Amino acid sequence: MTTTCDRRVPADRSDHRLGITVTGVVQGVGFRPFVHRLATELGLSGYVGNDARSVIIQVQGPAGSLDEFRRRLAADAPPLSVIVGVDVQPLPPAGGADPDFTIVPSENRPGARTLVSPDVATCDDCLAELFDPADRRYRHPFITCTNCGPRFTIIRDLPYDRPATTMAGFPMCPRCASEYADPADRRFHAQPIACPDCGPVLWFQSGPDRTTGTDAALAAAQRTLAAGGVVAIKGVGGYHLACRADHPGALARLRERKARDQKPFALMARDLPTVGTLVELDDQERAVLTSPARPIVLMHRRVDAPVAAAVAPGSPLLAVMLPYTPVHHLLLGPVPAASIPAPTVLVMTSANLSDEPLCFDDEDAADRLPALADAVLAHDRPIHVPCDDSVVRVIDGQVLPIRRSRGYAPLPVRLPRSLPPTFAVGGELKNTCCLIDDENAFCSAHIGDMGSLATTRAFARAAGQLTALHQVSPVVVAADAHPGYRTRTWAENHAGAPGEPELRLVQHHHAHVVSLLAEHGRIGQPILGVAFDGTGYGDDGSVWGGELLLLGTDSSRYTRVGHLMPVDLPGGDAAVRNPCRMALAYLAASDLPWDIDLAPVAACTPEERAVVRAQLSTRMGTVASSSMGRLFDAVAALLGVRQRIGYEAQAAIELEVLAESGRTGCGGVAVPLAFTLDADGVLDHRPVIQAVVTGLRSRVPPAVLAYQFHRAVATAVATAAAQITARTSIGAIGLTGGVFQNALLLRETRRCLVDDGWDVLTHRVVPPNDGGLALGQAIVAALAREQAAPAAPDAAPDHQIPQVHR
């Protein structure tokens, strides 16, 4: 059945007609009603519809009106739409055409798939209705419209229509059905549309007792929180654990239950004025906080922030987000007739044990949540795709993604051309996977660290959902070259045998550099990639992580043109967990004695020192490492910042904090820190370690030495870049890898390079850490598939990507 507008247009229209196909995120965002309103306003006839890939328009009328229609189609498009392409073809005018402009039903063309919108924070219009006592959706915890609400997490299949979502089990009441069918209504074809008469139901559960009714459930949750309890809250993409941010007892219980000893928690604040009591907020951070994506933003905390120290122990940063669902807004506001004050700030962290996947399924929640929470605030709208909160940081006015998930996934990275269908399994930490379909690279939501069977199962589920949603059968599966990664094992079990996709292994840091190229649309353009991180399997079997890779016009190949001088990693992961051990290794490599006046030496027991000494002297239980992340750990230990870590990169994060405080005291430092660079591009860290020790014994403040260390790394990158590219025409340099999440290092390095005339690329779309790895893997493997490159990575300095057979 078609939908028409009552307004008629003049019968004497000109004989011009256009066929227009619009691709991108154009479903579930109000695009068809927008087209309908625009065409009607301009007096045009025709129709608009959609299939599983695009919006299809045929429009007829005077040439001037058609020109205006084409202009405004892009300029005035709905705010949540993302137009990727507009194809316009002239058509013969339709004789005796109906003078109306109509919306026609969806088509489902086999093999055609549209882009899916991310989940979107509650819009201002819906918020106004939510708190308007005269509105029929007053205090309805699932209010939504075409401009906001769940999308990605409720979609089971495409095209995006209600029967293909988890709202299929909630038949619309007559009033909702009327709004859904009215092109002039804000809820026209809003698939999650609901009201108190026909929508999902909110409840509160404490032990065997269940409280139903929106306000009764909310009031019960607020009472539990006020008393210091931990409440699990079902959100749009999974469950959170919430507690008061100013209650040390609640925070202690939460940390104990999650087995999360020191890692900072995220906060949810009621509104922007409340955020202003927590952090120093600039205009760009304010814009990101209030964007439709509503990510968690890392910002500098105020000294008088009204939160307990246990929220973010020892950190000058707080991770803050604003409410993004109606349930959040209601929970953080007063409940009518309730006596308990509403919370203004809550800890809001994922409902799972550390290193386990996000809890999102109700059956799984019933199993896991009793050990984590005192009560549950939940509802009966199923979540089909789990999606954790996104995390970003604003550096020099630009957004740096730390975790790309809710609000951003599953928007694709657009590729410069079509590539073979490829699936990449990502890395071992901060895992995401990636699927290439034609000119789009679809990155999954954040999955997590692949350290448990539960996360491996979550990965397999995400892989199946991603390929099923886009109906793509990969011809290539890409994996990290590390032989011990669970993701590589998964890839080997699903590819490489006859009748299965090819399996191609991609070097870790090569993938980092190509992910950066991809998000900037520069695949195939020469670049010097600087990839600094904690660990990545090298082509020689050692641990890489301080890499300078040269890529030419073939992005599937690279040459390792420089790196940090390797040092033996004593005891593998034991050295990562204990930066004091890493410092001992760097002292030994720098021919410095383990004097007890040095903090890491004193931190190690005599037995521990003996074990490390034996490992380094015999080289048993060690592996060579050129990791910049491990160097940061060693310097942090030498400066007395952190000897043992409770979470990944803790020592490096705290070293950055110390360095920021030492920026103003560098003028009188008599011991400069500087790397040396040999003709092969090897950065020698020994002068830096020696200077740090000398500085400490000369009573140079550790904060000053920490800042000078950051400056030394930045200067070394600029010096190496100039030497390595002196005989090339390369003018672009890319900074990637987890070490470049360090805001001070990123600022200093970029400044040095820009001052030298470089075109500097940094991450804006996918994280520099391993959360962006799958994108690079997929592109490298797809390019290699096109060229059928057979060589192993260590076959030549100009590395090709191997095809692996089972």
Image: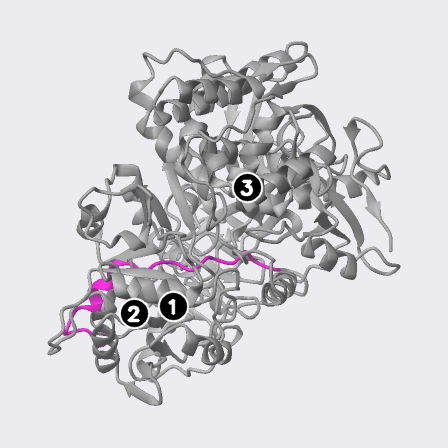
Left-right relation of 353 to 274:
right
The residue carrying pointer 2 sits among few (fewer than 14), some (14 to 19) or many (20 or more) residues within 10 Å by Cα, namely many
For residue 518, above or below residue 645: above
Residue 110 x/y as whole percent: 67, 65
Mark 1 surroundings within 10 Å by alpha-carbon count, few (fewer than 14), some (14 through 19), many (20 or more): many
Residue type, label 1: Gly
The answer to whether residue 513 is above or below residue 48 is above
**Which residues, given as a range, are shown in magenta?**
113-137
Which label lies toward us, 1 or 3?
Answer: 3
Where residue 285 appears, as percent x and y from the top left, is 30, 41
Q: CA distance from mark 3 to mark 2?
A: 55 Å
Residue positioned 59% across, 52% down in the render: 442
* Residue 539 within the segment the image draws in magenta: no
Label 2: which residue? 327
> In the figure, 390 relative to 195: above or below?
above
Image coordinates for residue 35, horizontal then vertical, percent: 41, 55
- At 49% across and 79% down in the image, what residue appears? 367
